[in-house]
Image (cartoon, helix red, strand yellow):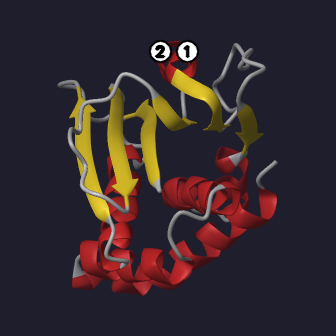
Amino acid sequence: MKEEIIISGFGGQGVLSMGKILAYSALLENKEVSWMPAYGPEQRGGTANVTVIISDELISSPILNSFDTAIILNQQSMDKFEPKIKPGGVLLYDPHGITRAPVRKDIRIHTIDATEIASDMDNSKAFNMIVLGAYLKVLPIVQLKSILEGLRKTLPARHHKLIPMNEQALQAGMDKVK
């Protein structure tokens, strides 16, 4: 098994954190992992993306030209990464702020309205965990318990009180992905 993932959106949407938690969770399951963030000088508001590779075997390079999965959170990322999804791959996106829906017919396309769900939860910071939950429903590459343990390991102890809210957000994403 090898899954090559790009997660891309605006800085401040939790793109890098989502990738870090996913990568750490895979490590907890004794998988090989590569996590490579990329962002411009405008970390908040500028475009940010992270490449995550999860594999049962050694990973030869973190540099990718195409992806098994793209998680897209803004139009610029849709324009850049939709063409780079391998045929038969997965595109998961939040339609909020997307002005041109995906056009590919050779990939599986799923939507999660994480912006609306986070608003309904009255917690915009839950956005990235909603998206991650949707991804885990579409492609359960790691177990939910590993994600929760990854949260405990990556969040500072002072934020551990937020783990139950994050678990609710993950579940909401799993329940509402289309």
Q: Amino acid at mark 1?
A: Pro
The residue wearing badge 1 is 83
Viewer-nearest residue: 82 or 1:
1
Q: Which x, y percent locates residue 175?
A: 78, 66
**71 displayed left or right of 109:** left
Question: Residue 99's quadrant in the figure?
Answer: top right
Q: Where is 80 relative to 8, above or below? A: above
Say whether residue 10 is left or right of residue 168.
left
At x 21%, y 38%, the residue is 61
How crowded pointer 2 is (Cα within 10 Å; few <14, some 14-19, many 20+) is rated as few
Give the mark toward the camera: 2 or 1: 1
Residue at the image point whose x is 35% and y is 47% from the top: 52
Q: Which element type, helix, strand or loop, lies under badge 2? A: helix
Residue found farthest to the left? 41
Which residue position is annotated with label 2?
80
Q: Which residue is depicted at the point 66% across and 49% down? A: 114
Instruction: Tell me where residue 38 sits by quadrant.
Output: top left
Q: In the image shown, does 52 or 55 lie closer to the viewer?
A: 55
> 145 above or below 89?
below
Q: How many marks?
A: 2
Looking at the image, do the residues carrying marks 2 and 1 touch, with CB atoms under 8 Å apart? yes
The quadrant in which residue 98 appears is top right
Instruction: Name the residue: 63% across, 76% down.
Output: 168
Residue 51 to residue 171: above or below: above
Q: Is residue 30 left or right of residue 137?
A: left
Q: Where residue 100 sits: x, y (%)? A: 70, 13
